[in-house]
Amino acid sequence: MLLSDIKENQTARIVHIGGNGALRRRILEMGLLKGSEVYIEKYAPLKDPIELIVKGYHVSLRVEEAAQITVDNVK
C-alpha cells in the first residue's frame, strides 16, 4: 500500500522508500526512514499536500511524493 492511499487519522509503518536522486534524499532527511511509524493527521482541502506526524514532528508531503513510499497499515 502507498502512503498516499492511507486515510486521515490512521497510522502506517514505512516498508520501502522509492524514488531516486534529490527526491529520495529529501524524504530520508525529513526522517521518513524504513520502519518509522507515520500518522496521517490531515489532508489539505484539495487533497494535496498531506500533513504527517513522524517521530513527534509535523511534515507536509505532496501526494506525488507520498506515492513513492510503500507502507503497511498499523491501525
Image (spheres, rainbow, N blue to C red):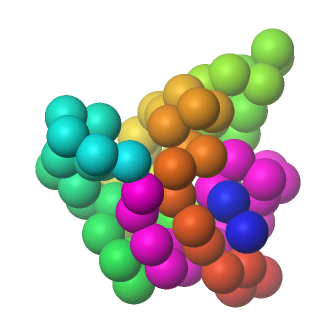
**Is 51 left or right of 30, judged from the image as shown?**
right
Where's residue 53, x and y in %? Answer: 48, 54
Quarter of the image for residue 6 reads bottom right
Instruction: Give the total number of marks visible in the rendering.
Output: 0
Q: Residue at x 45, y 72 (%)?
A: 16
Question: Among all residues in the image, which is located at the extreme top?
Answer: 46
Visible residue check, residue 28: yes
Percent x, y for residue 51? 57, 38
Q: Is residue 33 magenta?
A: no
**Residue at image coords 57%, 67%:** 70
- Would you say 24 lies left or right of 56 here? left
x then y, percent, for residue 9: 77, 58
**Is 72 placed above or below 62 here?**
below
Task: Say which of 8 and 65 sits in front.
Answer: 65
Magenta stretch? 3-18
Task: Identify the residue shown where x is 60% and y is 72%.
Answer: 71
Location of residue 71 with respect to 28 vertically, above or below:
below
Q: Is 52 left or right of 28, judged from the image as shown?
A: right
From the top left corner, tell me how far across and down residue 3 is, in percent.
64, 56
**Residue occupying image coordinates x 38% and y 48%:** 19
* Image quarter hosting the N terminus: bottom right
Residue 26 visible: no
Along the viewing direction, whichever of 17 and 44 lies nearer the viewer: 17
Indicate left or right for 31 with 43 as reference: left
Quarter placement of the C terminus: bottom right
